[in-house]
Amino acid sequence: MKLAVVGTGYVGLVTGVCLAKFGNDVVCVDTNTQKIEALSRGTVPFYEPGLEEIIRNNLEAGRLSFSTDLPSALDDALMCFITVGTPSLEDGSADLSAVRSVAETIGRSMKEYKLVVVKSTVPVSTCDFVRQAVAAELAKRREDIPFDVASNPEFLREGAAVRDFLEPDRVVVGVDCDRSADIMKELYSFLPPEKVIFMDIRSSEMTKYAANAMLATRISFMNEIAAVCERLGADVEKVRMGMGSDSRIGYAFLSAGCGFGGSCFPKDVRALKEFARKEGLEMQILQAVEEVNERQKHVLFGKLLRHFGCMKGKTIGIWGLSFKPKTSDVREAPAQALIADLAAAGAKVQAHDPKAMDETREALGDLQGVLYVNNQYDAVNGADALVLVTEWDIYKQPDFKKIRSLLASPVIFDGRNQYSPAEMKRQGFVYYSIGRGTA
Ligand code: NAD
């Protein structure tokens, strides 16, 4: 099939590239000229394991191309995927301006039947809005070209995006006619049919928000449990083992930590709350999920402050800046809240991340006293404490002897419960973690 994918970010790029891998002819479109030029050369603008290789293979095979010209990309395409960003507006609702702009361009330039597939995470009823936007542009042209709109929310996880796309738990498809259903079935014929769940469009749009809100809820729930464990001398890691082993609960998204970030959970929780609120429904659980998460992002700073009394003049080594391991994405990453707290308190920061240092520098601007270092041990050198924020593999079994010798005082704050309290004690560290007895 010939496909156009509009919005070449994490979702659009992975979607386009993986669909090309299955033999489709794909044009990935973006308004960002630099991005398109880099991608045409096979250079990926962000870190995602395995992606660069598939891009190069498909560029060479001639099945994949990159363009800034949506009308031309649409010419031959049967399907047009909308994968542009839907960031939060100030009131928390989803900004649909990029979705609208793409829908209008489709309506202005399409010459024959198209199936428009909305893959961006969008509030319930957005597919209707897309349909109206396309129809309005066609009406201006006095054209009556048929088209359909389908919903196909994306569930991939950054850091495992290619695998998630190729071997998903399931694919959700919202359709309102047989024609779109047949095209979507053909598109996903590389998957076992039972993995493709068809439903009406509004349920499909809602599924994405409900799933992300549930995962965010589990994290905030465990962070609250951790706070109680910490106060009463229980160990949240043991509690997690005991809970997760219950098949009704499971282990996924049950880890306490220093808060969730990323480009999806915070904004999707906000958007769901907001579009429910517009219907007169206050989502009280999600209100609490957000409040707990906001508090949790500052929990490490609180522990540092309690340990040191005053942060002015202290130097803190930070390991991990991306919002989770295996991605360079730093959107709403907990490390940024910590760095901002430390900078405001007059502390110096020596930060390290395997992939996300430039992105963090760009997100935070040039904050005084914040140094980005290329070696993880340089972050610790002369520092008063080490804080682990993102659990990249390279931080999991570090040389603790070296850390001890480099630190000015042997203190570790572990925001992801990666190290064993007993081992830390044996190695001579004062060790703080989340929800494991020591405050
Ligand atoms: P992103 O910010 O990485 O990429 C969006 C891209 O769209 C950018 O390259 C931008 O230049 C481009 N763009 C904006 N306006 C455009 C226009 N009018 N025409 C063409 N291109 C345009 O976003 P993302 O992380 O890929 O997310 C895209 C959507 O998918 C969002 O709705 C997000 O919530 C959802 N989603 C994201 C993830 C994830 O892990 N990142 C997972 C599932 C769903």
Image (spheres, grey):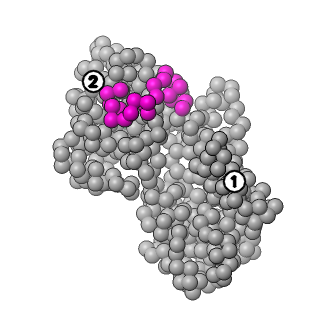
User: Residue at left 43%, top 51%?
Assistant: 160
Q: Kindly identify which residue carries mark 2.
A: 110
Which is more toward the observer, 284 or 428? Answer: 428
Q: Which amino acid does label 2 sit on?
A: Met
Which is more toward the observer, 358 or 387? Answer: 387
Q: Kindly identify which residue carries mark 1.
A: 242
User: Residue at left 59%, top 44%?
Assistant: 215
Residue 149 in view (yes/no): yes
Q: In this view, does 347 lie to the left or right of 25?
A: right
Q: Which residue lies furthest to the right in this view?
A: 232
Residue 362 in view (yes/no): no
Question: Which mark is first along the chain, 1 or 2?
Answer: 2
Give the image location of residue 37, x and y in percent: 25, 50
Give the image location of residue 248, x and y in percent: 65, 41
The label nearer to you, 2 versus 1, is 1
Which portion, as a residue range, is magenta?
185-207
